Image (cartoon, rainbow, N blue to C red):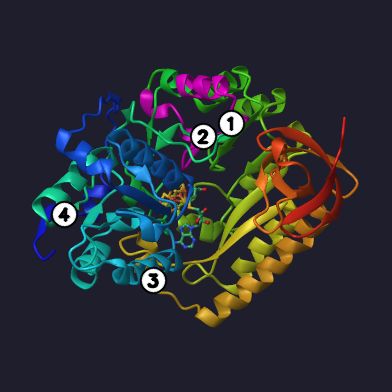
Amino acid sequence: MAFCKVVHTPEMKEAAKRNKEVINATYKNLEVSDNLKNLAKTRSYFIRTYGCQANVRDEETMAGILEFAGFKKANKIEDANIIILNTCAVRENAEDKVFGEIGQLKGIKRKGDDRIIAVCGCMIQQTHIVDIIQDKFRHVDLLFGTHNIDNILNLIEEVYEKKVRVIDVESKMGEVIENLPTTRIDPYKAFVNIMYGCDKFCTYCIVPYTRGKERSRKMEDILKECQELVDKGYQEITLLGQNVNAYGKDLQDGSSFALLLESVAKLGIPRLRFTTSHPWDFTDEMIDIIAKYDNIMKSIHLPVQSGNDEILRLMGRRYSSEQYKQLVDKMKAKIPNLVLTTDIIVGFPNETYEQFADTLKMVEYVKYDGAFTFIYSPRVGTPAAKMIDNVTMEEKHKRFDELVKTVEKYAIPKAEAYVGKTLKVLVDGTSKKNKEVLSGYSEENKLVHFKGDASLVGKIVKVKIKESHLYSVIGELVNE
Ligand code: SAH
Ligand code: SF4
Ligand code: F3S
């Protein structure tokens, strides 16, 4: 398809705009044209998702919309008539993977077939990426952004009917759209968006530009969705937001994360989790509610990013290492058996070895159960990307290895301490390699493998742990 219809292209300056206006939810009734219904009858789709749970949830919405129109899910990417790559922009290696995949998909198109290749998600919210795909990857038929998901049926219909490439990527503060159909990937564990976007603008991070303004869903809409999940027999809900502590503030109606968390816990879902919590604004009330309800899991992800005050300031994180430690102390004192994990960035521009050593000290202090560790990756258009950086890549890799060792110094003994204990495991499914082996996550968010019957999938069972590995533990089913 040679001709390209450009409806909107992304604009980072627009994407960074914020105002204080309350964003009211739009309750949408999707309509499908007869033409598209006919096309859908004989066509299938496949979505490949990269990145975080926000993208997983977007995949579920897109799948819901496509199935609502009549498209069927294909089992394999190469069998699908509509292929959608749902991308992540958080680090360069995430983007490289997507470019590799787009390149590979070129071979899949046959002359004369009307297969559509679409790319969406956070990567596409960046001007330079849209330019690259438009120029160099001419087999991509459709580009749309994170703000255009509700319109995907119209975009697909346009590509089919007019036989043009279409680019529609809006950069705006964003909306809250309710009532869109959804096809959940998992029948027992569900992600529920409580808010979208991010207003923190940490200086290294692309997310506020790709996802728009921090905007909360109304509490009644969230509770309705959670109640439906409880009624369907779901065992676990994870409340999602880039910074869940900020939930409700924008609504200016008294809603808060503490209130929401308590209200969802009271619905009686067996397991309730949330992600991600920013250390800034983690209130005492939130801690008390986490401690009070048995069905709120005591495993909390609390990204620290750095243990050095100057680096934290340059990152725009809004807390000091001391404040972070005080928060951790308070949480540990009030929440018995707390499991703490974190995110850490190594090699922020001009980070000295001494500053990096403060991060090691933080790991020593908190003794995390686990950590996601990243080498800083400059993101076009963010303030940190403009900083001149005097730290070599070789030095960053060395520090990264040292950090991983320090994390493991505490994480391994913590995993070993599970040996001999009995954990409650929500069974996800059977192992790909061995049908007799089941796997699932414990309340502590530990991956557990054990032998058992497939009929246990979706149930919470007790497993006595016999062996520990870094990322998983192995145990035996306890028969009651
Ligand atoms: N909203 C979440 C983070 C989402 S991104 C929060 O604030 O906790 C997940 C993680 O990716 C971040 O915590 C950070 O550690 C990492 N990350 C984000 N931007 C990055 C960059 N430019 N380079 C390296 N790591 C980055
Ligand atoms: Fe990115 Fe910071 Fe927002 Fe997390 S809080 S998404 S790291 S800007
Ligand atoms: Fe990636 Fe976008 Fe999530 S950049 S981490 S998919 S919000």
Q: Which residues are magenta?
A: 223-251
Crowd band around label 3 with a 10 angstrom C-alpha radius: few (<14), some (14–19), many (20+): few
First along the sequence among labels 4 and 2: 4
Alpha carbon of mark 4 to alpha carbon of mark 3: how far? 21 Å
Q: Amino acid at mark 4?
A: Val
Crowd band around label 1 with a 10 angstrom C-alpha radius: few (<14), some (14–19), many (20+): few
Image-based side of 28 in relation to 356, left or right: left
Are circles 2 and 1 on residues that touch, CB within 8 Å? yes
Identify the residue under disc 2. 245
Identify the residue under disc 4. 166
Q: Residue at x 54, y 47 (%)?
A: 319
Q: Is label 3 in a helix, a strand or a loop?
A: helix
In the displayed structure, 115 sits above or below 357; it is above
Q: Residue at x 18, y 54 (%)?
A: 167
Is 248 contained in the magenta span? Answer: yes
First along the sequence among labels 2 and 1: 2
Is 159 contained in the magenta span? Answer: no
Alpha carbon of mark 4 to alpha carbon of mark 2: how far? 38 Å
First along the sequence among labels 4 and 1: 4
Please state the horizontal and vertical placement of residue 462, each as a whole percent of the image.
81, 36
Question: Which label sits on residue 283?
Answer: 1
